[in-house]
């Protein structure tokens, strides 16, 4: 009972001064990752129509930055564009236990609200930390498998709720205002998994819409518009309507031990998180045994039950992806890329690779099976098993318990900066990239965000 009130109280009372240095550092780390994927994502084919729509929505003053473009826009619409762009590459951060991508919703809302509020770096960090707490805790509380079973994408649904709290925090609403913002957001949370049917762009829109909705909810609350005070636990509230297997007791469990930013993973491969472990396993075997693609007879991959219908079924679609979105959610495609090219980066997820005869032939040698052993540690871990049979008759096996980028197997700051630099090569000059990194790494010293966000504009 009183889950809404208790969660809001925790978020309202959190202060920058309460945060351990490791949490502040991790928040900066996650922000840099987000900025890199958002800047490169602005070039995606799905981002361009969003930008055209946003461009027609008007500006407030100088407007908020649409990252990686020359545009400024109304902050709520800038959040829409930034969230959609950042999610387009499938390289954004992810939380295993909640099966969702927090940065694309929370960071987008934080920057939009931060523009409206003229907030400091410390204020931005506060807003991001509470948004991650709300979004991730709701995802875990709903039970990801039960939420997916109802056809919802948790990044969009839980992201709307988290974004509302982020925006309310940065706009400095009182506790009642924050509760109203969360309540209003509950009538806006929407995100359908039907994009899997034909590779539509809509998945990419989900976090942008969540960020946009969160800002709108907070602005409405600031003007006295009310939302239901029992939006989470009520009979028709979020936990009941969006899941058939929610665990309300999880919502406030072990608050701050650790903060959820510390449990967030970074993606090295440009595809669905359920594919990361299997790709790591393939790369490990190929490198360790010095295999060439021509040595590979068959690849057999053990996949988690929750991810199986997302990346492995139906097989006829997964071995015949028709779009980059299809490929991002095709385990056979990811496996084929790893075998053939030794990586699964943006350079592999292209229309040209979709048409490659070598890729199509290799996909047919990939078999996905549900491995019940893997499910025993899910969702706290997302393991994968890999078996490669060679043409000489050898069978080489491995199991990946912590894919690269997990908190237990993290990218270092240096590796993250390399990822940022590679992603933003087509967008920013080298000197600008260095300045962005420097400002993010000293974020708490920023009196306002203008000097950082101005750097995020692409010079024509």
Image (tube, grey):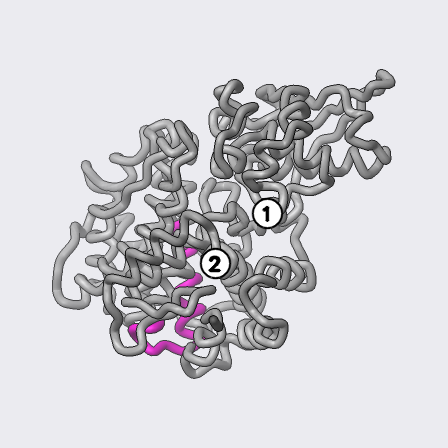
Total marks drawn? 2
Q: Residues within 10 Å of mark 1 (few under 14, many from 20)?
A: some
- The vertical placement of 293 against 106, above or below, is above
Q: Residues within 10 Å of mark 2 (few under 14, many from 20)?
A: many
| Range drawn in magenta | 113-135
Closer to the camera in the image, 179 or 409? 409
The label number, if any, that marks residue 38 in the structure image? 2
- Tell me where residue 371 appears, x and y as whole percent: 61, 21
Q: Secondary structure at mark 1?
A: loop
Closer to the camera in the image, 417 or 399? 417
Q: Is residue 88 visible in this depiction of the protein? A: yes
Relative side of 221 to 395, left or right: left
- Tell me where residue 460 appears, x and y as whole percent: 47, 71
Residue corresponding to mark 1: 346
State yes or no: discs 1 and 2 in contact (Cβ < 8 Å). Answer: no
- Tell me where residue 381 appears, x and y as whole percent: 58, 38
């Amino acid at each position: 009972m009183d889950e809404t009130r208790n969660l809001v109280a925790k978020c309202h009372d959190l202060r920058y001064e309460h945060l351990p240095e490791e949490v502040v550092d991790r928040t900066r780390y996650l922000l840099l990752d987000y900025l890199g994927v958002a800047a490169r994502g602005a070039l995606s084919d799905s981002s361009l129509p969003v930008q055209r729509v946003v461009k027609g929505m008007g500006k407030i003053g100088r407007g908020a930055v649409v990252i990686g473009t020359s545009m400024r826009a109304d902050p709520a619409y800038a959040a829409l564009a930034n969230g959609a762009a950042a999610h387009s590459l499938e390289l954004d951060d992810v939380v295993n236990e909640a099966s969702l991508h927090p940065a694309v919703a929370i960071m987008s809302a934080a920057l939009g609200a931060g523009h409206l509020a003229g907030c400091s770096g410390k204020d931005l960090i506060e807003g991001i930390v509470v948004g991650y707490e709300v979004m991730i805790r709701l995802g875990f509380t709903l039970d990801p498998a039960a939420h997916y079973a109802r056809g919802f994408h948790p990044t969009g649904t839980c992201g709307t709720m988290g974004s509302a709290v982020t925006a309310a925090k940065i706009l400095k609403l009182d506790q009642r205002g924050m509760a109203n913002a969360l309540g209003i957001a509950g009538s806006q949370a929407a995100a359908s998994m039907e994009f899997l049917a034909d590779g539509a762009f809509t998945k990419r829109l989900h976090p942008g819409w969540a960020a946009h909705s969160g800002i709108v909810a907070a602005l409405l609350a600031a003007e006295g518009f009310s939302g239901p005070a029992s939006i989470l636990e009520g009979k028709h509230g979020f936990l009941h309507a969006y899941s058939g297997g929610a665990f309300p007791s999880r919502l406030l469990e072990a608050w701050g031990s650790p903060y959820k930013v510390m449990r967030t993973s970074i993606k090295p491969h440009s595809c669905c998180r359920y594919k990361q472990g299997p790709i790591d396993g393939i790369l490990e075997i190929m490198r360790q045994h010095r295999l060439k693609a021509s040595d590979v007879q068959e690849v057999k991959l053990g996949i988690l039950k929750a991810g199986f219908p997302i990346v492995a079924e139906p097989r006829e679609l997964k071995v015949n992806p028709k779009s980059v979105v299809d490929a991002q959610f095709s385990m056979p495609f990811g496996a084929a890329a790893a075998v053939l090219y030794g990586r699964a980066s943006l350079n592999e997820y292209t229309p040209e690779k979709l048409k490659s005869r070598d890729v199509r032939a290799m996909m047919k040698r990939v078999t996905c099976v549900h491995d019940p052993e893997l499910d025993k540690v899910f969702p706290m871990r997302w393991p994968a098993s890999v078996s490669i049979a060679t043409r000489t008759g050898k069978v080489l096996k491995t199991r990946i318990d912590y894919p690269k980028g997990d908190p237990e197997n993290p990218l270092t700051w240096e590796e993250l900066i390399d990822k940022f630099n590679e992603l933003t090569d087509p967008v920013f000059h080298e000197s600008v990239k260095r300045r962005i990194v420097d400002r993010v790494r000293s974020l708490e010293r920023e009196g306002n965000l203008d000097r950082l966000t101005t750097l995020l504009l692409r010079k024509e």
